[in-house]
Image: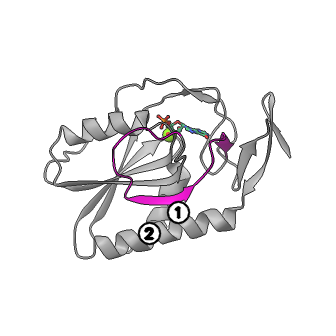
Amino acid sequence: MIDIGDKKFSLFIEEEKVLAAVKTIAEQLNRDFKGKPLLFVSVLNGSFMFTADLLKNINLNNAEVEFVKTSSYEGVSSAGNVDQLIGLNRSLTGRNVVILEDIVDTGNTLDRIYKLVQQQNPDKIKVATLFMKPDVYKKNIRLDYVGMEIENKFIVGYGLDYNGWGRNLKDVYQLKE
Ligand code: IMP
Ligand code: MG
């Protein structure tokens, strides 16, 4: 059990299991994009650790990465609306784009990012997310690569935060109700 801010969290998924899920996604991408150029669009802040570990396991020669930013969470429940996409310095037109998310909850954030990416007419858009909550996901965007499906409880660690804290934790913790 650990304290983060005013909340208590208990160990949920150990680093080893998280890394195994990341590796599985990397293997699928290596297979699906063999011989093709690929541009990762990593959604900060939450995806930084996932992106780093994923890219270490990508063995494609023509892979690039861009980091973008948006946010939809205040505290432990989704705020429902998200900011503008910022930080994209590269044209996506005609590219194979893989959006990298740490977690898909309601899907509002992903929906917004997906539309902004789509506006630039990429050739293909795929979505990779480390975690997803199937009970609350309410969008129709296909999640092509999913590390782990989890129950609808708030988690921190491995890049994910509670009010900015806990991103540094290497294991994943779950909010104790
Ligand atoms: P959505 O827009 O509801 O899908 O929420 C997506 C964003 O909210 C993610 O990119 C995270 O930054 C954040 N988020 C959603 N669920 C959690 C969680 O359980 N812990 C920490 N952050 C979360
Ligand atoms: Mg995020």
Residue occupying image coordinates x 67% and y 48%: 157
The span picked out in magenta is 136-156
In the rendered view, tell whether residue 173 sits above or below residue 58. above
| Residue type beneath disc 1 | Asp
Report x, y in % for residue 55. Answer: 44, 64
Q: Which quadrant of the structure image shows residue 166?
A: top right
> 30 or 168, which is in the foreground?
30
Question: First in sequence: mark 2 or mark 1?
Answer: 2
Does 55 sit left or right of 154 as displayed?
left
* Mark 1 CB within 8 Å of ligand 2: no
In the rendered view, tell whether residue 13 sits above or below residue 87. below
Q: Which type of secondary structure does the marked residue at label 1 adopt? A: helix
Q: Which residue is mark 2?
A: 26
Does 107 sit left or right of 19 as displayed?
left
Whether 10 is among the magenta residues is: no
Report x, y in % for residue 45. Answer: 51, 40
Look at discs 2 and 1 and give the one toward the viewer. Answer: 2
Q: Magenta region's main secondary structure?
A: loop
Report x, y in % for residue 82. Answer: 42, 26
* Mark 2 CB within 8 Å of ligand 2: no
> 138 or 42, which is in the foreground?
138
Q: Which residue is mark 1?
A: 53
